[in-house]
Image: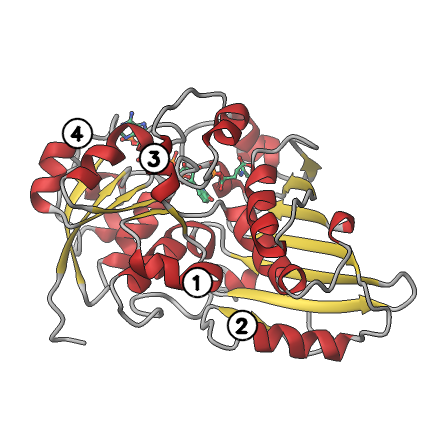
């Protein structure tokens, strides 16, 4: 690995939560070199002014965003920006020959009409959106390997889809019975100040939000539909939980075959993910906790069957900032470049 040429990469939105995770992980990645960090209100500041604990490793200044300048020095560009901004610079970056990995929702949807109705923005770059590949390597590894543009999944869709995929792909559930009950830590809302994410608001409290209208619903449905081969709708309810990092998605669905027991399903899940180093299927009776995943790129899946109701219950735990965001984007980079899928990514969580 030490003989690998270091590929020059840039991160736009380096000052945000996704950006700093990308910096932290990529500064130790053996095959890349960080050559450009970009931002908006932070432009002109030293990156280390914002994140002093990384000062020994990162000496760059954050620059204003200019696709011409970025393309002159970078072969790969990560975009970690609020929704609606990546689509303004991606076509230019692609034209200049860069590969682009977008962490926002801009390139997750094949059908721009779905994006514009859920994200309240007008766009006309349908051709670019069509060419993008959904960045969930466990499902689309081959397409990612060939892509120039990746639309990395949202954090809730990552946890939810990894739980649902084996069931939908193999027709094991009645699809319309699927219910996703998910909880996220506050870092899911990004670094910008928001009242509901203040400690005094979020602490000692647990509540649902955007019920029956969260924008991750159509994203989850798009991929479920692709897996099942026919239109799927799901019920998705997100909750904000008083912790900083992590998502636990608990998925319920009615099994088509009431004779299936927990051990059968664990065997099916293990076979489905046998070539996926970042998914860990728990042994019978073990249910995942977000603290296992925090700091790591792993998704832990726990599986149970309630013989009484005929439902499968799948619990999926990830770190929203790693497997749910920056780590997954790096996993996609590794696949795109033909590198080992685990390169530069953390295996173990940091708690306890
Ligand atoms: N947080 C999470 O768990 C997840 C987030 N995502 C998605 O990833 C993306 C980034 O999220 P996150 O890191 O949380 O967001 P943050 O709010 O933490 O960071 C946003 C970044 O975008 C930069 N930025 C904002 N406006 C502009 C602009 N006009 N031009 C250039 N840069 C700009 C900010 O720069 P500056 O500070 O200099 O103003 C900052 O670096 C979002 O689309 C989010 O939805 C995806 C999965 C999980
Ligand atoms: C706790 C919290 O606020 N979470 C965010 C999810 C962040 C994310 O992954 O969303 P996108 O990448 O699709 O923007 C939310 O519910 O909007």
* Foreground tag (1 vs 3): 3
Is the CB of the residue bearing disc 4 within 8 angstroms of ligand 1?
yes
Cα gap from disc 3 to disc 4, whole angstroms: 27 Å
Disc on the earlier residue, 4 or 1 = 4
Disc on the earlier residue, 3 or 4 = 4
Give the residue pinned by disc 4: 64
Give the residue pinned by disc 3: 127
Cα gap from disc 2 to disc 3, whole angstroms: 32 Å
Cα gap from disc 4 to disc 1, whole angstroms: 30 Å
Dot 4 alpha-carbon crowd within 10 angstroms: few under 14, some 14 to 19, many 20 or more: some
Dot 1 alpha-carbon crowd within 10 angstroms: few under 14, some 14 to 19, many 20 or more: many
Question: What residue appears at the point 71 percent right and 78 percent down from the top-left corner?
Answer: 284
* Foreground tag (2 vs 1): 2
Quadrant of the rendered image containing residue 344: bottom left
The dot on residue 297 is 1
Q: In this view, does 41 lie to the left or right of 171?
A: left
Dot 3 alpha-carbon crowd within 10 angstroms: few under 14, some 14 to 19, many 20 or more: few
Cα gap from disc 2 to disc 1, whole angstroms: 15 Å
Quadrant of the rendered image containing residue 239: top right
Q: Is mark 2 on a helix, strand or loop?
A: loop
Rendering coords of residue 274 (x, y %): 52, 77
| Callout 4–callout 1 Cβ contact below 8 Å | no
Give the residue pinned by disc 2: 273
Cα gap from disc 2 to disc 4, whole angstroms: 41 Å
* Foreground tag (2 vs 3): 3
Rendering coords of residue 151 (x, y %): 39, 45
Question: What residue appears at the point 48 percent right and 65 percent down from the top-left corner?
Answer: 298
């Amino acid at each position: 690995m030490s003989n690998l040429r270091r590929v020059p990469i840039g991160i736009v939105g380096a000052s945000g939560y996704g950006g700093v995770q990308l910096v932290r992980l990529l500064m130790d990645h053996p095959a890349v070199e960080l050559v450009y960090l970009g931002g908006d209100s932070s432009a002109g500041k030293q990156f280390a002014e914002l994140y002093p604990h990384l000062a020994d490793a990162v000496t760059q200044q954050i620059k204003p965003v200019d696709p011409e300048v970025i393309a002159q020095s970078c072969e790969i560009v990560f975009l970690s920006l609020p929704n609606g901004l990546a689509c303004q610079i991606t076509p230019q970056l692609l034209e200049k020959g860069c590969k682009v990995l977008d962490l926002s929702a801009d390139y997750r949807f094949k059908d721009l009409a779905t994006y514009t109705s859920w994200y309240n923005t007008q766009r006309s770059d349908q051709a670019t959106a069509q060419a993008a590949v959904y960045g969930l390597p466990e499902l689309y590894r081959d397409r990612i390997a060939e892509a120039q543009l990746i639309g990395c999944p949202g954090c809730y869709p990552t946890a939810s889809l990894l739980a649902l995929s084996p069931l939908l792909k193999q027709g094991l559930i009645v699809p319309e019975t699927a219910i996703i009950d998910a909880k996220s830590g506050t870092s899911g809302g990004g670094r910008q100040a928001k009242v509901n994410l203040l400690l005094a608001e979020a602490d000692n409290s647990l509540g649902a939000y955007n019920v029956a209208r969260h924008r991750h619903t159509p994203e989850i449905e798009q991929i479920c539909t692709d897996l099942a081969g026919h239109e799927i709708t799901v019920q998705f309810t997100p909750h904000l939980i008083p912790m900083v990092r992590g998502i636990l998605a608990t998925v319920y669905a009615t099994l088509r075959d009431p004779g299936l027991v927990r051990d059968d399903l664990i065997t099916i899940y293990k076979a489905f993910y046998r070539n996926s180093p970042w998914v860990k299927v728990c042994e019978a009776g073990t249910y995942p906790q977000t603290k296992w995943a925090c700091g790591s790129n792993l998704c832990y899946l726990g599986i149970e069957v309630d013989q009484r109701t005929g439902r499968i219950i799948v619990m999926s735990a990830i770190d929203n900032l790693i497997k749910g965001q920056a780590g997954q984007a790096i996993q996609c980079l590794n696949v795109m470049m033909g590198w080992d899928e685990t390169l530069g990514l953390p295996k173990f969580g940091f708690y306890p």
